[in-house]
Structures are given as C-alpha cells and as structure tokens.
Image (spheres, rainbow, N blue to C red):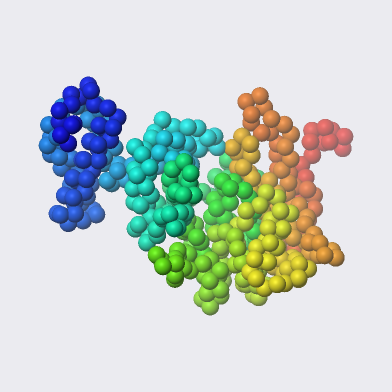
Amino acid sequence: MTSLNSASPGRLTGQDLIRLKKYLADNLMRALESENISVAQRADFVQQNIIHVYEQTQLKLPNDLRKEIFEQVLNDLLGFGPIQSLLDDEEVSEIMVNGPKKIFVEKKGKLTKTNITFDDDDHVLRIIDRIILPLGRRVDADSPTVDARLPDGSRVNAVVRPVAIDGPSITIRKFAKDRLQAEDLINFGSLTRPMADFLQACVKARFNIIISGGTGSGKTTLLNVMSGYIPENERIITIEDAAELQLQQDHVMRMETKAANADGLHAVSIRELVKNSLRMRPDRIVVGEVRGGEALDMLQAMNTGHDGSLTTVHANTPRDAISRIETLVLMAGMDLPLKVVRQQVSSAVDLIVQQTRLKDGQRKVTAVTEVAGMEGDIIVLSDIFKFTQSGVTTDGKVLGEVNATGIRPNFTPRLIAAGFNLSSEIFAPKLSPKQDSRR
C-alpha cells in the first residue's frame, strides 16, 4: 500500500482504487479465516472491521468515495460484487455480463446496458467462484462452461476463457420472489381465462404436456403455474439441471443433475435421473427441460403408465417441438426408425403449449395444440387456441389476441371421463365486431 499512502485523494487513479479495494478485501478475508467467523456472523464482523483496516492505509478519502468503496468491498465479500445491486432490483429479470466492462440487464422485456463494471477478468472470476464453489461445481480452461444457481434459486450460466473470447461471462435468469399463479399470467395478458381453465383440466386429467418455447420465453414460469394444478395427494418427482421449479405441493421429491468431478467422473445426467425416477413410485414426473437422449426415456415413461408428465423443450412452434423431440429421441442411440419414433411421440404426448417472447418483450402462450395422432408417417397437430398478431403500434408494441379455433380436441371424451365437462364456450371463437354484425 506504499504508493497509495503517498498519493493524495485527488490524485488516486482507477488502478489505485482497484488496489485499495483488493487490499481491504484481502485483509478482511484473512481476518475472517483466522478468527473462524461463522457464516451468520460474517456481515457484522466485516462491517465492524472494514473501518479499522481502512484506517491502516492512512488515506483520507472524501466521505462519498469512501462510502462507495466500502459498499463495493462489502458486496465482494458478502454478496456477488458489482452485480449485487442488480440482483436486489426487483425490476431486473435477467443480468448478462459480457466481460468485465459490459453488463446488460433485461427490464420489462427490454435489454439495456448498465454503467456497472467489474475491475478486470479476475474480478469476474472471483464472483463466478463465489457462485459455484458452494455447489461443488468448477469452471476452468478444461471445463469452461458451468450451470449453477444462486441461493434464491436464480439460474446462472458462466463461461470462461478460452471459450469466452472477450473475458468471463455470466448470465443470470433471476428467480421470482413470489410464485406466479395463473391469475397473474391472465392479468399480464400471457394467458386467457378459457386457456387457463382448459390447461387446468388437462393437467388434472393426467394428460402428458410439453411446454415449447425459445430462450427466455417463460417456459419455466408456465411450467411452475401448470404444475400447481397437480393434486396434493400425488407424489411428484422433479428433475432439473439446476433446480428452479417452485412446486407448492407437500409430496415433492426434487432431483438435480451432478457435474463431473475434476477427473471427469461421477457425473449424473438428466437421463440417469429420469430412469431412476421410474423406480421411485412417481405419480407425476416433471422434467425441467429435455435436451438429449432422456427424451426417449421420458416418452417411454409416458407410454407405460406414468400419465400426467410435464416437461419443456426449446422450439419456436408446436411443429418444431415435435421435430425437436424426434431429434432428441434419436440422440439416445437406439437406432430406431423415424416412423417408430413418431408413433412413440404421437401416442405419448397429448398437448403442446407454445410459449413465445414477442418482439416487444411480451411473453404469451401463442398456441395450445393437440397431438391428434398419425396420418401415414406424419404426426397430426390440431390448434385449440391460437394467437394472431394484428399489427404493431408506433412505439413497437405488438397487437393481437389469442382466440379459440373452434375445434374441440379429440381427447374430449377423456376429459369428460375424468370429470371435466368443459363448456362449449371455451372452444368457441370470439367473433370480430364486423363478423358479429353480420349474424
């Protein structure tokens, strides 16, 4: 700290301040370790001792600058560094760190660049380690990507060099503090009341449902809402890469994948967990996302008595979702003919719910589609509800509405047998004022 001691506050450079923060953090960390302070007492200890460590530097910084430095050091030691304020901001739904000097956030569906920065690559790496080490995960040049979660359940992906060319990257999908209900999605315009009533009946009637959508479209949120319809008296097994589902039922068994150790051994994949779940007497299997060969195991489970399963898949339309599942099944390495795969899909899956993030940031259910069987070699899909875009306002807001198509699903007798005799009004398309005037 010699150079800092000899510098006047007015002549401190950015590098000087970085060295000061590192000096404070390193000394406080050593004190924490030597005193063997418990996790519960860490915050009080650091706040009490940071002034003492600062005074040893003999610097006389202006109060506002000193307060800012202290806050940054506290965030580094007790939180997640510069991005802690973004994590605390309830309006921020996603945080994207593209190297130490470019941090973007999503607010209300819109991406904006922040004025927040990390000191350097090492600073970003320290925060990545803070996130993943308690979970027993690692990231380095040999294993440069990692998925993890924050204590509140927020989903984290980190990528480091050599894969991340411009410096370590962090992407955080924030975890909603309050679990959303169907009523919230209806109020947001993501879902209509008839769709919600229909989906509730399908879940309770133990239909196998796939939620399809692109990245950030709201698939997991919708999966959370729909899983809330599962009756309390059923045993639910959830399987995820990084646990983020918020099921409220009492009888839930949660499982999460395990990354390989430093020797590349002892990984536990979603496919292994799906296979294992069949031995656990599940009433329902809920898989956060299928993205590999576990799609075959999931289909086989659906076809062998494990009705009412729910999962998500990355796809932009219901037809794309079918193609994606076919591809994932073929990845299982069973060398099945495509027609056999399609027969498996058509007999296992009852419904595809398409979730879409529109260009203006709105997240909507844009299609509810029945898997209606096979015609020749082709899986037949039938839209029950469909979103139709009617235009865009001058400020970029997408206009349109979801409407019933007028088609009653082929599985209506199964709904009735399960006790759900849905009103015909649910499936009746709303007429436009022009159409209504002609009647």
Q: Position of residue 191 (x, y in %)?
A: 63, 45
| Location of the C terminus (image quadrant) | top right
Q: Residue shown at 34%/37% (left/top)?
A: 119
Q: Which residue reaches farthest bottom? A: 279
In the rendered view, tell whether residue 178 sits above or below residue 431: below
Q: Which residue reaches farthest right? A: 438
Q: Quadrant of residue 203?
A: bottom right
Q: Position of residue 254 (x, y in %)?
A: 47, 65
In the rendered view, tell whether residue 426 sits above or below residue 69: below
Residue 7 in the figure: left or right of residue 348: left
Between 139 and 62, the one nearer to me in the picture: 139
Residue 329 in the figure: left or right of residue 256: right
| Location of the N terminus (image quadrant) | top left
Q: Quadrant of residue 223?
A: bottom right
Q: Position of residue 225 (x, y in %)?
A: 55, 53
Q: Residue shown at 79%/64% (left/top)?
A: 373
* Number of numbered labels in the structure image: 0
Residue 261 in view here: yes
Q: Quadrant of residue 21?
A: top left
Between 261 and 86, the one nearer to me in the picture: 261
Q: Residue shown at 14%/54% (left/top)?
A: 35
